Image (cartoon, helix red, strand yellow):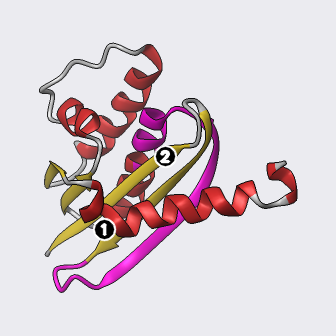
Amino acid sequence: MRYQMNTDGGARGNPGPSGIGIVIKNEKKEKIFELGSYIGKATNNQAEYTALIEGLKTALEKNITKLDCFLDSELIVKQMRREYKVKDAELKILWQKASGLASKFEEIEFKHVLREKNHDADLLVNKALDAYQYSPRGH
């Protein structure tokens, strides 16, 4: 069975308070997992990678072996496909983690989608950031 995972990461300010969103669906397009989480201060790209890493870990924990990963960050997709080099030192560490996890899948693909097509994951990022921003610790 081939699964679909949408991930998104975002920062308010770059760097700034950041969140991640992950949605995993089975072949019938049924959601089997979703997560929105505040991750602290990060850049947009760091948040995107963190979402991808957490999503890949979750997929492996669920014994998923075939996965299509959809991200709205063209940079991350091209780096994961090795079309672009990772020049930033901090991103390189995250790329290495993501690549190590990706290598454990039987089949994995990274695909770029427009933000509108990544709505569920984007919504989870914003909910997590709103919850943090409007909580007592967010002020």
| Left or right for 28, reference 89 | left
Q: Residues within 10 Å of mark 2 (few under 14, many from 20)?
A: many
In-front residue for pair 20/82 = 20
Q: Nearer the viewer, residue 99 or 74?
A: 74
Image: 91 above or below 42: above
Magenta segment: does it hold 79?
no
| Callout 1: SS | loop
- Does the segment drawn in magenta span residue 29? yes
Graded by Cα atoms within 10 Å as few (under 14), some (14 to 19) or many (20 or more), the crowding at tag 1 reads few
Q: Answer with the quarter of the image where residue 45 lies.
A: top left
Q: Which residues are magenta?
A: 26-51
**Relative to residue 20, is residue 45 depicted above or below?**
above
Instruction: Inspect the image, locate mark 1, and give the three-letter code of the amino acid beneath it.
Output: Asn
> Residue 63: image x %, image y %?
30, 68
Q: Secondary structure at mark 2?
A: strand
Residue position marked by numbered label 2 in the rendering? 10
* Picture coordinates of residue 103, whole percent (x, y): 22, 42
Q: Nearer the viewer, mark 1 or mark 2?
A: 2
Closer to the chain start, of discs 1 and 2, is: 2
Image quarter of residue 23: bottom left
Instruction: Locate residue 104, reporting x and y percent.
Output: 25, 48
Disc number for residue 71: none
Q: Is residue 95 left or right of residue 20?
A: left
Q: Is residue 16 left or right of residue 72?
A: right
Residue located beneath label 1 in the image: 63
Q: Nearer the viewer, residue 124 or 61?
A: 124
